[in-house]
Image: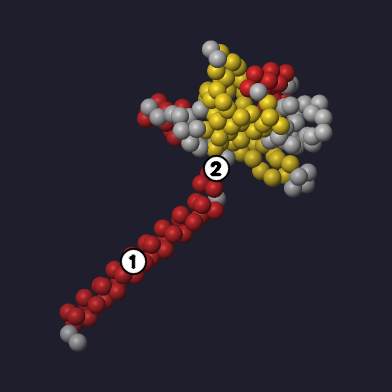
Amino acid sequence: MSATSVTSVTSVVSASRRRAAVRLLSVVAFGSLVLTGCGEGKEPADPTGPTAVAASTGKTPWAGTKQFVTVDKAWAEGGLTYLSVRPAEKKVNTQFDTWEIIPGTGAFTTVTMAKDARVLLTAPVRGDDASGAGRGEPLPSSQAEFVTLLTQLDAGTAAGVGYDLSFDGQGQVAKLQSLYRP
């Protein structure tokens, strides 16, 4: 075998190994994103936050996604319900079989609820008066009732409650569910 053919065989093998290594690294990177939930429930960085994305791209933030948030306030105006939300993080508290809510930082974003959005509330948001239901059992509620209940909570309790929000394709909240917090 000549020196030229050995060199070309070596370069072919090296190129093949490089492609295989790149594919393997791609699979590992993708797998780690899937396993970690792609940052689900974590606060987005400011340049990619919902307000910044909406301003820079003209697209509705969070359209078609699920987000975990804290709600600063809720109000009804012009037949629509609005929420002032900020991304947060939730962790399982195995000691008490409940959730630990870690509020995010930064500015709150105003989102609109779809007119037919489902609202499911647990304690402490709905209170303890739900007969026959456990405090952690999510019970259906109206948007108007949610606004009233949220405004009646003391500020410390309200700040520590987290919500799972599901957004429709237009970026409106299609489902809101409070997480149980004793």
Upstream in sequence: badge 1 or badge 2: 1
Q: In percent of the image, x 49 and y 56: which residue is there?
A: 31
Q: State the image coordinates of residue 152 (x, y, percent, origin top left).
A: 72, 18
Is 158 drawn above or below residue 21 in the view shown?
A: above
Which residue is at the front of the view, 92 or 145?
Answer: 145
Q: How far apart are marks 1 and 2 (CA)?
A: 32 Å
115 displayed left or right of 169: right
Q: In which quarter of the image is the N terminus?
A: bottom left
Q: What element carries label 2?
A: loop
Q: In percent of the image, x 65 and y 19: which residue is there?
A: 144
Amino acid at dot 2 = Glu
Q: State the image coordinates of residue 131 (x, y, percent, origin top left).
A: 82, 30
Local crowd size for mark 2, using a 10 Å CA cut-off: few (<14), some (14–19), many (≥20): some
Tell which residue pokes out farthest to the bottom in this image: 1
Residue 154 visible here: yes
Q: Mark 2 points at which residue?
A: 40
Instruction: Please give the count of numbered marks on the rendered protein.
Output: 2
Local crowd size for mark 1, using a 10 Å CA cut-off: few (<14), some (14–19), many (≥20): few
8 displayed left or right of 38: left
Q: State the image coordinates of residue 33 (x, y, percent, origin top left).
A: 50, 51
Q: Which label belongs to residue 18?
A: 1
Q: Examine the image and state in which quarter residue 90 appears.
A: top right
Amino acid at dot 1 = Arg
Q: In percent of the image, x 52 and y 33: which residue is there?
A: 167
Of labels 1 and 2, the one closer to you: 2
Q: What element carries label 1?
A: helix
Q: State the image coordinates of residue 70 (x, y, percent, origin top left).
A: 62, 30
